[in-house]
């Protein structure tokens, strides 16, 4: 019995994925759980394990191709067995039926007949049977392309799409992600040629169309000195998210300076002990995560997120830490940071940083963040404002610790000072609420307690 290899859903927001590389070739033997291929999601590159054992008898999706979640991208079979399907098959979750249209005039009688059940002799997958009931089509009238002639979900979708009235022929088969990207890039979907399964328009198709349109417009302009640099997938996603955030969320900013003398002294006193006892190198980012977590616990309103017609209260204190990588900016998340010791935070931060630099972050490393810290102090930056990381309501921008003038007991002294800027979504938080949170954070940083870490 053939085993389908499908494009997995590797995150809550994933709608499609790109095959980066197959780690096995056709006709090679594969063990269950053995690394089989790498895929790229909208957040990271992930290594996928084999769902079963056997021979990789057929690869349906080549490196560089993008398909919806649930699409069949290959087959594992027993030695000598050959699958009959040659078309990637999206599951029911791949796209709503309303996004499908026929490019041929076909009678809609099949949709109108009462076909609540299918003869027992029809071989069909469970997903195909569910779709047949949903679309009210007769499985007996569908030619199966699955193993042994089995009717699969893709066959049902194609049959249903062909039975839609010819009046609907102008509708476009497009994934939800591609629809959103098309809206953001002002791309006319009727002018885009789909290269996905069954003529689907994918994100890649929309982006290619946008690039071609830009090149055409540029061709009418005087030549420029230089060359265009293609963005990585992560850079594209980040650009889209930041544009949407800056244009959609009304930002306001709060700025403070922090007397970092005691914080610096505490870090210095713990460096050697943390290294010897826990094998970690404490950074100021570790302290920031720890004290932000404690302040967030005191101010749960900062965990709220805008939900269109109201607010959504997040419970877990999962803090994202912005990191610069060869692939672009990423924001891995330290989950339940308020439940971790300083050493545990430091170890988790180091692990995430190592995976981020190697491009090996897992989808769960990037999900469910409720607050973000972005620290540019190591780059010599004194002060900056950050753009919100949607759907989060606040992000903390941290500048370098530098000796500045400080008035103490009527005397001007030089002291190590840290600058903080809190960017806030005004739909979620007002100035007073955000100021109270920032005030308590400053209190933690200026009066760090060994017992807290």
Image (spheres, helix red, strand yellow):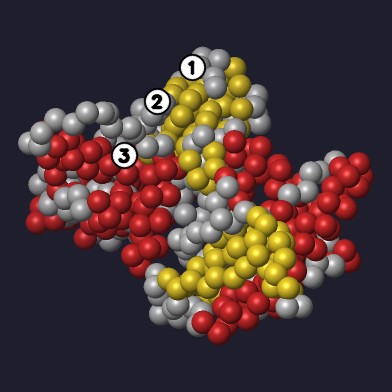
Query: Element under label 3?
Result: helix
Residue at 12%, 40% (x, y): give it: 217
Q: SS class of the residue under badge 1?
A: loop
The residue mark sitting in front, 3 or 2, is 3
User: Mark 3 or 2 closer to N-term?
Assistant: 2
Asked whether the residues under the numbered discs 1 and 2 touch, taking CB atoms below 8 Å apart as contact, a structural biologist would say no
Disc 1 and disc 3 in contact, CB within 8 angstroms:
no
Q: Residue at image x 22%, y 42%?
A: 210
- Quadrant of the image for the C terminus? bottom right
User: Element type at marker 2?
Assistant: loop
Which circle marks residue 62 in the picture? 2
Decide: is 78 above or below 167: above
Q: Is residue 416 visible?
A: yes
Which marked residue is nearer to the observer: mark 1 or mark 3? 3
- Distance (Cα) linking label 1 and label 2: 12 Å
For label 3, the crowd category at 10 Å Cα-Cα, with few meaning under 14, some 14 to 19 and many 20 or more, is some
Q: Is residue 191 above or below residue 285?
A: above
The percent coordinates of residue 322 (x first, y second) are 57, 51
Query: x%, y% of residue 161?
Result: 23, 49
Q: Residue at x 64, y 27 (%)?
A: 34
Q: Quadrant of residue 352?
A: top right
| Sooner in the amino-acid sequence: mark 1 or mark 2 | 1
- Of 62 and 138, nearer the camera is 62
Q: Which residue is mark 3?
A: 204
Q: Name the N-terminal-most of marks 1 and 3.
A: 1
Q: Residues within 10 Å of mark 2 (few under 14, many from 20)?
A: some
**In this rendering, would 418 be left or right of 248?**
right
Mark-to-mark CA distance, 1 and 3: 26 Å
Residue 26, numbered circle:
1
């Amino acid at each position: 019995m053939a085993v389908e290899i499908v494009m997995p859903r590797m995150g809550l927001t994933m709608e499609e994925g790109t095959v980066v590389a197959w780690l096995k070739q056709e006709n090679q033997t594969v063990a269950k759980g053995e690394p089989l291929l790498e895929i790229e999601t909208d957040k990271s590159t992930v290594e996928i394990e084999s769902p079963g054992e056997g021979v990789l008898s057929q690869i349906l999706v080549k490196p560089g191709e993008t398909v919806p979640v649930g699409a069949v991208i290959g087959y594992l079979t027993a030695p000598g067995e050959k699958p009959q399907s040659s078309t990637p098959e999206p599951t029911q979750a791949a796209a709503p039926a309303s996004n499908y249209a026929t490019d041929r005039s076909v009678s809609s009688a099949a949709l109108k007949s009462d076909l609540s059940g299918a003869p027992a002799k029809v071989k069909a997958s469970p997903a195909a049977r569910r779709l047949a009931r949903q679309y009210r089509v007769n499985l007996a009238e569908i030619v199966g392309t699955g193993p042994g002639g089995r009717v699969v979900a893709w066959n049902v979708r194609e049959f249903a799409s062909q039975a839609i009235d010819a009046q609907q022929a102008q509708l476009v088969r497009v994934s939800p992600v591609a629809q959103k990207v098309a809206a953001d890039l002002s791309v006319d979907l009727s002018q885009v040629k789909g290269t996905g399964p069954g003529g689907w328009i994918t994100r890649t198709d929309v982006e290619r169309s946008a690039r071609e349109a830009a090149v055409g417009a540029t061709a009418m302009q005087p030549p420029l000195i230089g060359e265009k640099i293609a963005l990585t997938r992560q850079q594209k996603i980040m650009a889209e998210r930041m544009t949407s955030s800056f244009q959609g969320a009304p930002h306001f900013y709060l700025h403070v300076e922090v007397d970092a003398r005691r914080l610096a002294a505490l870090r210095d006193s713990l460096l050697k002990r943390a290294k010897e006892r826990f094998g970690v190198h404490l950074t100021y980012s570790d302290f920031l995560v720890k004290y932000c977590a404690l302040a967030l616990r005191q101010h749960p309103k900062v965990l709220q997120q805008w939900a269109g017609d109201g607010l959504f209260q997040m419970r877990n204190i999962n803090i994202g830490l912005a990191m610069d990588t060869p692939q672009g900016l990423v924001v891995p998340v330290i989950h339940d940071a308020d439940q971790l010791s300083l050493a545990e935070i430091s170890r988790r931060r180091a692990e995430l940083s190592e995976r981020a630099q190697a491009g090996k972050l897992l989808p769960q490393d990037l999900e469910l963040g409720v607050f973000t810290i972005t620290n540019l102090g190591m780059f010599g930056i004194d002060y900056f404002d950050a753009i919100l990381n949607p759907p989060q309501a606040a992000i903390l921008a941290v500048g370098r610790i530098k000796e500045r003038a400080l008035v103490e007991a009527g005397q001007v002294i030089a002291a190590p000072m840290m600058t903080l800027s809190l960017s806030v979504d005004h739909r979620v938080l007002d100035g007073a609420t955000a100021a109270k949170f920032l005030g308590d954070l400053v209190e933690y940083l200026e009066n760090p307690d060994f017992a807290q870490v």
